[in-house]
Image (cartoon, rainbow, N blue to C red):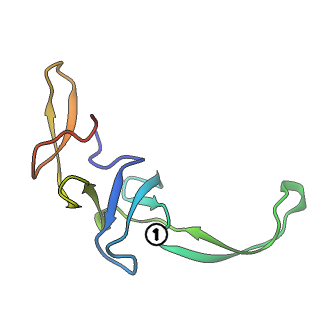
Amino acid sequence: MKKIRKGDNVIILSGKDRGKQSTIIRFVNAEKVVVRDVNRVKSHVKPNPSKNIIGGIVEIEKPIHISNVAIFNIDKNKADRVGFRFDESGSKVRYFKSDGTLIDS
């Protein structure tokens, strides 16, 4: 089970976008994530009429390392660590280490 998942609210810990809050769009691999509106770069795209792609300069989100993001605790209004425990039904759940509240509930 991963500590950070797709759709989680995260805060950026380092880099040019430090302090921004956003959500995870997707995982590139086990160590890289793409975060909405973070690490945006301009990329030149060639036109491809068969795929209906208009060429030009587009802005896309590039992946950043997972160590540069931390899950955001809305109640505490700060970055937090994630722990695992079993609930009453015996299923494994994630919780915030600072106050013990469940993330997935």
Q: Is residue 91 above or below residue 33?
A: above
The answer to which of 93 and 27 lies nearer the viewer is: 93
Residue furthest to the top = 89
Helix, strand or loop status at disc 1: loop
- Residue in view at x 47 percent, y 65 percent: 63
Q: Quadrant of the N terminus?
A: top left
Residue pointed to by mark 1? 38
In this orientation, which residue lies closer to the viewer: 45 or 35? 35
- Looking at the rendering, in which quadrant would you find the C terminus? top left
Give the answer, above or below, for where 46 lies relative to 74. below
- Residue 54: quadrant of the picture: bottom right
Number of marks in the rendered image = 1
Dot 1: within a 10 Å radius of its alpha carbon, few (fewer than 14), some, or many (20 or more) residues?
many
Residue drawn 27% across the image and 57% down it: 72
Which kind of residue does numbered mark 1 sit on? Answer: Val
Residue drawn at point x = 35 percent, y = 54 percent: 9
**On the picture, is 32 further left or further right than 19?**
right
Name the spot of residue 45 as percent of width and height, x first. Answer: 74, 72
Where residue 79 sits: x, y (%)? Answer: 22, 61
Judged from this view, the residue extending furthest toward the right is 49
Horizontal placement of 101 versus 8: left or right? left
- Where residue 70 appears, x then y in whole percent? 27, 60
Q: Quadrant of residue 89?
A: top left
Q: Residue visible at 48% across and 61% down?
A: 36
